[in-house]
Amino acid sequence: MITVKGLTKRYARNTAVDHISFDVQKGQIVGFLGPNGAGKTTTMRMIAGFIAPSSGRASICGHDVESDALAARTCLGYLPEGAPGYGEMTARAFLEFIADLRRLKGGARTSRLEYVIGRLQLGAVLEQSIDTLSKGFRRRVGLAQAIVHDPPVLILDEPTDGLDPNQKHEVRSLIDEMARDKLVVISTHILEEVDAVCTRAIVIARGRIVADDTPAGLAARSRYHHAVTVRPAEASRLPALREALGALDGVAAVEANEHEGRLTALPRPGASLIGAVSALCAAHGIALEELYLESGRLDEVFRTITT
């Protein structure tokens, strides 16, 4: 539903996006992530047709975003960075204006406006001008305009930026709901977002793709993949437990977080530690508050592949 081939954007001597290529299909929630300045937003803007690439091409549902721009945009819902709107308009007037631009008419227009207003809980602010809304409500109005015409493809740039935890949960639930029959691309630098909602993660750094995998696949690259973390009931047992863990077969290293009273045993390649760590603690009479197997840490993988 989105095809990108050799997409490049140069500004004078600076190359913001450098020959990016990928394909994404219906039903996927793709996290497009990278550090600030990596080229995420520039890539999203080129796919959405907001800026022209220096070279390469992108298409949405088979429509080239440059040569067949109107057809491509008809298939697209786009939430730009910062969710810009017309500040003097009320939220209701703005959404009605967008519905007109999207050529929604009659019952379909009414039902779609009712749906986005209700689903994003905008009823209380419909008569307020956009420039008086909180950052969270402006973001929700921006998301509402992106989905009002029920497009098959959604590109959302930082969709939960400025939202409180409850609002983030609602937006993530909406994204999950919509992805059943759409393609959703989320541009973000928030790893929590990828882990919470995405089925695929494309990582960009210095304008190039450096990883393309599932969130679980990325986590498996972490040195904490299959590590075992323990927290003894008595903090005084930490030094002895650390020494004992370090002597176990299959343990490559032991990291201590003395502030939280935790130890993490890092495995050698192919080693399974959970049973051995549990047996060791039982043999030494060490009562545990916590013992768990780690799947891997996305933040550590992210730092490794983007720096």
Image: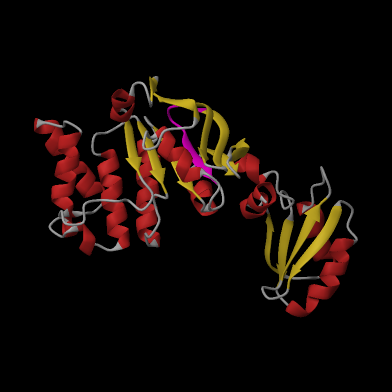
Q: Is residue 110 inside the magenta stretch?
A: no
Residue 32, above or below 280: above
Q: Name the spot of residue 244 as percent of width and height, x first.
A: 87, 65
Residue 186, above or below 26: below
- Residue 298 falls left or right of residue 243: left
Work out whether residue 10 or residue 236 is closer to the camera in this orientation and state it.
10
Residue 181, above or below 116: above
Residue placed farthest to the bottom in the image? 236
- Residue 72 falls left or right of residue 92: right
Q: Determine the residue positioned at 49% across, 32% down.
A: 54
Q: Determine the residue positioned at 10% across, 32% down.
A: 107
Work out whether residue 17 or residue 162 is closer to the camera in this orientation and state it.
17
Q: Determine the residue positioned at 38% across, 60% down.
A: 162
Residue 197, above or below 252: above
Q: Determine the residue positioned at 49% across, 50% down.
A: 193
Residue placed farthest to the left in the image? 106
Q: Name the spot of residue 49 as percent of width and height, x first.
A: 37, 33
Magenta segment: 23-33
The quadrant where residue 251 appears: bottom right
Work out whether residue 125 or residue 259 is closer to the camera in this orientation and state it.
125
The quadrant where residue 77 appears: top left
Q: Name the spot of residue 35 as percent of width and height, x first.
A: 56, 52
Q: Is residue 24 visible?
A: no
Q: Would you say the magenta stretch is mainly helix, strand or loop?
A: strand
Q: Name the spot of residue 23 as percent of width and height, x first.
A: 51, 26
Q: Is residue 238 visible?
A: yes
Q: Quadrant of the N terminus?
A: top left
